[in-house]
């Protein structure tokens, strides 16, 4: 009797196990078929431009070529001057025609002004407070006016001596390295960063009197790598909360470090102005601090905007 009951028990367990396995298989199959049907249905929308067919869920991600300009040129020969690509759950359009690009960027620029912010970009721009990621509206128009004034001929001419001094310093450095191997890419990156920091606040990464310069260079280099790194969260927004690659966490750490640098530089400049320094500084920081104090009360230019513009100028 015990043997019969044990056999019956094992038989029932095996039966339930098989049933459970088949339930999982059927559920997964229905899920895959549903995703494929939705993908096919969305891809067959006649209002969308043509484009290469991709795989369910991943779209065209696996077919992207690192040489994107050559890859896009090849697709343009097949699908025409405007075509679509599905990157995960995101739909993108590639335009290779100057006339269509002019229509999008000039004739209908307001419609296409807004864009999705990458997870790392959202952190690095103080929550999208710079002119690159701010949605079109009063705040964006205010930032555009600030950038137009900051990059006007008068303002650029005022920092001409800073750029000239750094170029001469770079030429002198390269001249002193004649006959020895030189990492041209590294030197160009260093020179451009020096010019940028000169125009931003008059300092360079070669100055040994302050640890700010060297730290700034290191943070910018690490941040640039993170911003260029493909992030799963950008292709599948529903997974952004999990930060599977840890990019947001790393960028938050870099953001705190670079914010500390900005705070030290700004505090130093405000202290100099309060003490009445004899030599008036001529750089973007001086210009932006004055603009912040004289800004529009309706859409004020805040210290967060100032730091965000510094951040986007650095990266």
Image (cartoon, rainbow, N blue to C red):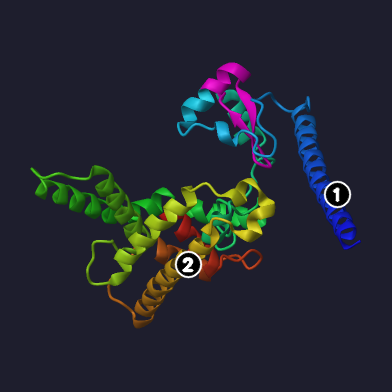
> Which corner quadrant holds the N terminus?
bottom right
Q: Residue furthest bottom?
A: 275
4, 8: nearer the viewer? 4
Q: Residue at x 65, y 35 (%)?
A: 59
Q: Residue at x 85, y 51 (%)?
A: 11
The image quarter containing residue 182 is top left
In the picture, measured across the screen, residue 179 lies left or right of residue 99, that is left
Disc 2 and disc 1: Cα gap in Å?
A: 53 Å
Q: Position of residue 208 (x, y in %)?
A: 22, 68
Q: Return the mark for residue 127.
A: none
Q: Residue at x 38, y 81 (%)?
A: 274
Q: Nearer the viewer, mark 2 or mark 1?
A: 1
Q: Position of residue 164 (x, y in %)?
A: 24, 51
Q: Residues within 10 Å of mark 2 (few under 14, many from 20)?
A: some
Specify start and end residues of the magenta stretch as a single range: 74-97
Rendered position, 225 above or below 210:
above
What residue is pinned by disc 1? 15
Whether residue 46 is in magenta: the answer is no
What residue is pinned by disc 2? 253
Rendered position, 113 above or below 85:
below
């Amino acid at each position: 009797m015990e043997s019969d009951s044990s056999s019956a028990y094992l038989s029932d367990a095996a039966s339930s196990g098989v049933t459970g396995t088949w339930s999982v298989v059927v559920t997964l199959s229905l899920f895959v078929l549903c995703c494929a049907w939705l993908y096919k249905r969305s891809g067959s929308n006649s209002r969308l431009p043509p484009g290469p067919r991709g795989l369910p869920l991943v779209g065209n991600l696996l077919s992207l070529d690192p040489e994107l300009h050559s890859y896009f040129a090849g697709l343009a020969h097949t699908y025409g001057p405007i075509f679509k690509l599905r990157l995960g759950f995101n739909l993108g359009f590639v335009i290779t025609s100057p006339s269509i690009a002019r229509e999008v960027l000039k004739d209908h620029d307001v419609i296409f002004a807004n864009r999705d912010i990458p997870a790392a970009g959202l952190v690095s721009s103080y929550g999208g407070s710079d002119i690159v990621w701010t949605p079109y509206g009063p705040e964006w128009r205010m930032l555009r006016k600030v950038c137009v004034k900051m990059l006007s001929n008068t303002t650029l001419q005022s920092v001409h001596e800073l750029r000239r001094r750094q170029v001469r310093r770079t030429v002198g450095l390269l001249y002193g390295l004649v006959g020895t191997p030189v990492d041209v890419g590294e030197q160009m990156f260093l020179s451009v960063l020096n010019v940028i920091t000169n125009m931003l606040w008059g300092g360079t990464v070669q100055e040994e009197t302050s640890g700010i310069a060297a730290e700034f260079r290191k943070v910018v280099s690490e941040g640039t790598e993170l911003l260029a790194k493909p992030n799963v969260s950008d292709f599948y927004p529903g997974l952004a909360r999990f930060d599977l690659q840890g990019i947001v966490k790393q960028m938050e750490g870099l953001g705190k470090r670079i914010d500390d640098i900005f705070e030290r530089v700004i505090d130093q400049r405000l202290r100099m102005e309060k003490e009445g320094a004899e030599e008036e500084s001529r750089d973007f920081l001086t210009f932006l601090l004055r603009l912040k104090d004289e800004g529009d009360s309706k859409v004020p230019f805040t210290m967060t905007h100032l730091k965000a513009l510094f951040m986007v100028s650095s990266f």
